[in-house]
Image: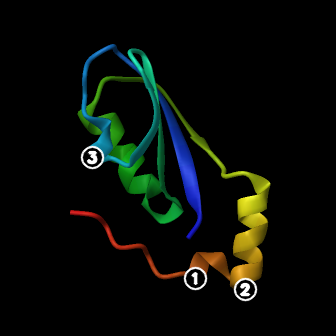
Amino acid sequence: SSMKKIAVKLDAGGADLSVYGEVLERTPGSAVLRVPKADVPRVTARLLAEIDIIDLTVEDPPIEDVIEDVFAQKDPDAAPVAEVAS
């Protein structure tokens, strides 16, 4: 399943971002999360509602991943939604 990165700039608080996705990088003022593409709208809404976010950017995966997805299935958007971890 294709993934996206969500880069956030936030106040230097110690919020636990692992509940939103896989934490790839973390500094006192920023973080990069990796989440399934289908979960991006829900995760970004939660981040903005629950944490003091200064800036938020959603990044596409590397082109190699996109090409792999295209060849793996005809319509990536028709893929079933990944299970949400509880």
Query: Which numbered disc, 3 or 1, marks the residue that appears first in the sequence?
Result: 3
| Closer to us: 1 or 47 | 1
Helix, strand or loop at mark 2: loop
- Dot 3 alpha-carbon crowd within 10 angstroms: few under 14, some 14 to 19, many 20 or more: few
| Closer to us: 20 or 49 | 20
Helix, strand or loop at mark 3: helix
The three-letter amino acid code for the residue at tag 1 is Ala
Identify residue for label 2: 74
| Closer to us: 23 or 43 | 23
How is this picture coloured? rainbow
Identify residue for label 3: 19
In the rendered image, residue 49, in percent from the top left (x then y), is placed at 28, 37
The quadrant of the image that shows the C terminus is: bottom left
The quadrant of the image that shows the N terminus is: bottom right
Image-based side of 35 in relation to 69, left or right: left
The three-letter amino acid code for the residue at tag 3 is Val
Q: Which residue is located at x 42 percent, y 16 percent?
A: 29
| Distance between mark 3 and mark 2 Cα atoms | 32 Å
Question: Residue 76 is drawn in which quadrant?
Answer: bottom right
Label of residue 23 in the image = none
In the rendered image, residue 9, in percent from the top left (x then y), is placed at 46, 22
The three-letter amino acid code for the residue at tag 2 is Lys
Q: Which residue is located at x 27 percent, y 46 percent?
A: 19
